[in-house]
Image (cartoon, rainbow, N blue to C red):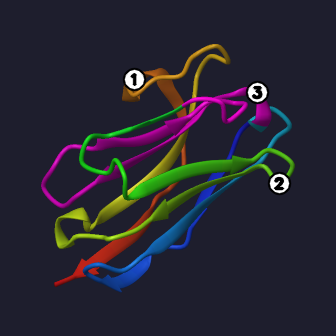
Amino acid sequence: QVQLVESGGGLVQAGGSLRLSCAASGRTFSSYAMGWFRQAPGKEREFVAVISWSSSSTYYGDSVKGRFTISRDNAKNTLYLQMNSLKPEETAVYYCARVRADWVVTTKQEEYNYWGQGTQVTVSS
């Protein structure tokens, strides 16, 4: 069983930064790609970023490219999302997730089968 627990959310002013963390249980963390998604009020959940198991590949949603950085520490079973130059429209619940198959690196939500409970990020204008 895999458990994912996000932390690091909070209230920040527009233009500010936050670093989210996602702590994973289990011994298989290092074998799977991991992703970040977010869901704003009244909107569908959307892809933010994904990183391969080895950190050799990363992909970002168009709206966060150049401002967000996904990373991982396999020794600590932890995933990170550094968010810079935050915008009010990025207020959302941010979720980390693990892909269902160890060869997959994808932006598609349906390919993720383990999800955290989410952490709230609020960006004030």
Q: Which residue is mark 1?
A: 110
Q: CA distance from mark 3 to mark 2?
A: 13 Å
Residue type at mark 3 is Ser
Q: Which residue is mark 2?
A: 76
- Residues under labels 3 and 1: Cα distance? 19 Å
Q: Nearer the viewer, mark 1 or mark 2?
A: 2
Residue 89 position within the rendered picture, expressed as x and y whole percent measured from the top left: 17, 65
Which residue is depicted at the point 78% across and 49% down? 77
Tell me if mark 3 has few (under 14), some (14-19) or many (20+) residues whose alpha carbon lies within 10 angstroms of its own.
Answer: some
* Quadrant of the image occupied by residue 28: top right
Determine whether, in the image, residue 75 is placed left or right of residue 72: right
> Badge 2 local density, few (<14 within 10 Å), some, or many (20+)?
few
Distance Cα–Cα, label 1 vs label 2: 26 Å
Q: Is residue 50 magenta?
A: yes
Of the image marks 3 and 2, the number of the one nearer the N terminus: 3
Q: Nearer the viewer, residue 95 or 86?
A: 86
Quarter of the image that includes the C terminus: bottom left
Mark sitting earlier along the chain (3/1): 3
Stretch of the chain drawn in magenta: 30-57
Q: Position of residue 1 (x, y in %)?
A: 74, 36
- Going by the numbered disc 2, the residue's amino acid type is Lys
The circle drawn on residue 31 is 3
> Mark 3 near mark 1, Cβ–Cβ under 8 Å?
no
**41 in relation to 110, above or below:** below
Secondary element type, mark 3: helix
Residue at 76% x, 27% y: name it. 31
